[in-house]
Image (spheres, rainbow, N blue to C red):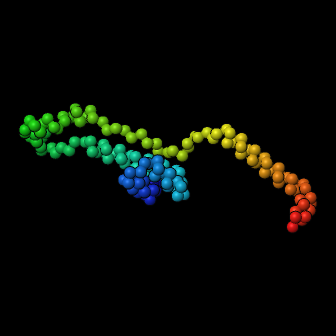
Amino acid sequence: MVNQDILGGLKSALERGESLKQAMMTFYNAGYRKEEIEEAARALKEEQEHKKIEAQKPLKSPEISEKKLIKSPKLKEKIPSKTERLAIKPPKASQKISGYEQNKKPNKIFIIVLIIILFVLFSILAITFLFRRELIEFFNRFF
């Protein structure tokens, strides 16, 4: 079941002009579960697509035909025919529902530097345990 808080928050963020990915990351950083956020985003996408489809359907009443509504030739030029309306397709949004798995490979130099720093720190720790008495005597001379 879709979490209505997340769904409402995503709608609100999109209305403010924020991208779906940014809104999802905001909820993720706030502590919501990834699965709940993705489910709400899917539901929002389906709802938006459903609204687009409904908006594309021509509103017709059975008693009034299209010919009766359009009497002047100027109006007929402005209104597209049925085939033109069906041929017009809305642009598809290409937002990803989930963008958590961003596979950024860390720099190899950065990893090597971190390993060297880790090695130096472990060496200092081992030296303090091995030469504990000598270090204490050394510092006692100064203080």
Q: Residue furthest front?
A: 142
Please tell me in which quadrant of the rendered image residue 82 appears. Answer: top left
| Residue 39 horizontal/vertical position (percent) | 47, 50
| Residue found 15% across the figure and 44% down from its top | 62
**47 horizontally vs 85: left or right:** right
Q: Is residue 105 above or below residue 134?
A: above
- State the count of labels: 0
| Residue found 42% across the figure and 39% down from its top | 94
| Residue found 54% across the figure and 46% down from its top | 100
Residue 136 at least partly seen: no
**93 horizontally vs 66: left or right:** right
Out of 2 and 22, give the one closest to the viewer: 22
Of the 4 image quadrants, the one containing the C terminus is bottom right
**30 horizontally vs 117: left or right:** left
| Residue 52 horizontal/vertical position (percent) | 31, 44
| Residue 35 horizontal/vertical position (percent) | 52, 50
Q: Is residue 105 above or below residue 122?
A: above
| Residue found 7% across the figure and 38% down from its top | 72
Q: Residue furthest left?
A: 71
